Amino acid sequence: MESATGGGAGELAGAVLVTLADREDAEELAEQLLDQGYEPCTVHRDMLAGEDDAEDVDWVIEVRTGPHGGPAALDEPHLHLLAEDYGGFAAPHRP
């Protein structure tokens, strides 16, 4: 399920980035989101600029489309609540 983020900013318009500290939690939540109809739910590492310790990186679930077929940003409050269950957060992608 892990993949690199590719594509331009236009591809992420309306996307929500769900950030969690643990890879297993991110993969588990991504599976739940897929089951709920969100897509795609790609998981990748997010190392901040200047971050030295690869063990301290966050894991990000990139969600572009909600189960309703519209942008996932419409569901950001719901995604944020799910992320909080794992000690994380969700925020709309800002290009």
Image (cartoon, grey):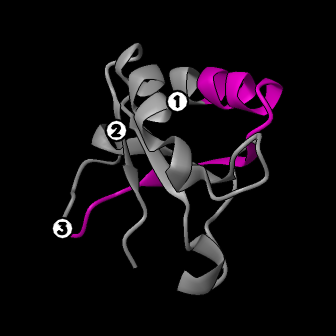
Q: Which mark is residue 23?
A: 1
Q: Which residue is mark 3?
A: 50
Q: Amino acid at mark 1?
A: Arg
Q: Is residue 59 left or right of residue 50?
A: right
Range of magenta residues = 27-49
Q: Secondary structure at mark 3?
A: loop
The residue sitting at 60% across, 84% down in the picture is 10
Nearer to me, 77 or 49? 77
Q: Secondary structure at mark 2?
A: helix
Residue 40: x percent and y percent? 76, 51
Residue at figure coordinates x 52%, y 30% from the top left: 23
Pointers 3 and 1 in contact (C-beta within 8 Å) = no
Q: Is residue 47 magenta?
A: yes
**Distance between mark 3 and mark 1 Cα atoms:** 21 Å
Answer whether residue 44 is visible to the viewer in this image.
no
Numbered tag placed on residue 55 in the rendering: 2
Quarter assignment of residue 34: top right
Q: Which mark is residue 66?
A: none
Do the numbered discs 2 and 3 sit on residues whose CB atoms are within 8 Å? Answer: no
Q: Mark 3 is on which residue type?
A: Gly
The N terminus is located in which quarter?
Answer: top right
Marks 1, 2: nearer the viewer: 1
Q: Is residue 42 magenta?
A: yes
Residue 37, percent from left and from top: 80, 35
Residue 49 spot, x, y in % from top left: 23, 69
Cα–Cα gap, marks 1 and 2: 11 Å
Q: Position of residue 52 (x, y in %)?
A: 21, 56
